[in-house]
Image (spheres, rainbow, N blue to C red):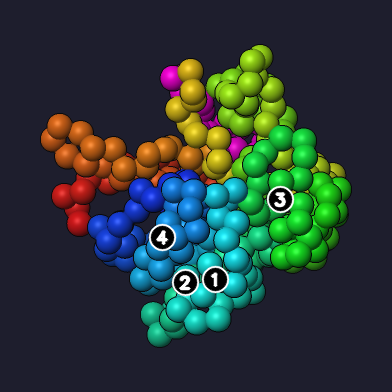
Amino acid sequence: MTFNIAIIGDLHSHWDDIDVVQFNRSAYDLLLFTGDLGGGTRESSLRMAKSLAQLSKDTLVMPGNHDTVSIAELAAELSHRSGSNALAAVRSGSAATPAAIRLCGFSSHRIVRDAIDVTLITGRPHSLGGPELAYPEHMAREYRIDSLEASQRRLAALVDRAESDRLLFFSHNGPVGLGDAPDAMWGCDFRPGGGDWGDPDLRGAIDYALAQGREVLAVIGGHMHLRTRCNRERPWLQHHQGVSYVNAARVPRIAVGEVDTHRHHLAATLTSQGIEVREVFVPQTCA
């Protein structure tokens, strides 16, 4: 038995009705969006959210640094009603149950199917990466988070409450600790000399979970585009101390070629043994 997850990297408006059709026809049990829905404007983020609301799959959307519009507005566009920024649990998939499409952040979602028992912990929304809390006034107002230390404590509390021994972490950005070269997985490519641009609070939560004897299967993020500003390619998958680190931010995710157009996402398969992740390039002709 498997549980199948699609991970769709930063959209930046590269999403349309063809994607909706493809994912609605797919066999995925859960869709994860790493954020940055629009092109940097309120209108584009809300337009993308309204399109995502057409999905018939359980879906979690992590707000990115481009998605700092009103959380209530964004949630309402996703759900076509007042909405909520938390989903209590991921269902095992009943055709009679309507799909849930929600924003996430600082939330916990248990996945249970036969021998599979994994808790998905969602990290800090709107991350810009680096050593400082991005959008502090917004974070304090919407999430009651006023520092990276407060964020780490919130995430550690989610670890403590998780009923599963196995965990997944899902955030807009990735954690520190995977290199400071400009083309490292979450390395800084916009400052001379590079630098590690991962989230310290996410790293603290991962280390805390491991210290508590939890098994962290994977850490999933985006934000730092796989093609760097110096035209080099970051790794999209790394394994470190038994944890799989995944960066889904292949931007643009829709690539127009001479013969066909391909749409990118990652496919993660949960089994009783762990997790496997692979890149998927779907031809537009499959729609």
Circles 1 and 2: CB distance less than 8 Å? yes
- Compare marks 2 and 3 and give the one earlier in the sequence: 2
Query: Between 61 and 74, which is closer to the camera in this rendering?
Result: 74
User: Of the residues tagged 2 and 3, which is closer to the observer?
Assistant: 3
Task: State how far apart marks 1 and 4 are (Cα).
Answer: 12 Å
Residue holding disc 1: 73
Q: For residue 26: magenta?
A: no
Residue 130 rendering spot, x and y as whole percentages: 71, 35
The residues colored magenta run 231-246
Q: Residue at x 64, y 15 (%)?
A: 192
- Relative to 237, is 276 above or below? below
Q: Quadrant of residue 253?
A: top left
Residue holding disc 4: 48
Task: State how far apart marks 4 and 2 are (Cα).
Answer: 9 Å
Indicate which disc residue 135 carries: 3
Position of 94 with respect to 74 (left or right) is: left
Residue 166 rendering spot, x and y as whole percentages: 68, 54
Q: Residue furthest bottom?
A: 96
Mark 2: amino acid: Glu
Look at the image and tell me whether residue 167 can be seen: no
Tell me if mark 4 has few (under 14), some (14-19) or many (20+) residues whose alpha carbon lies within 10 angstroms of its own: many
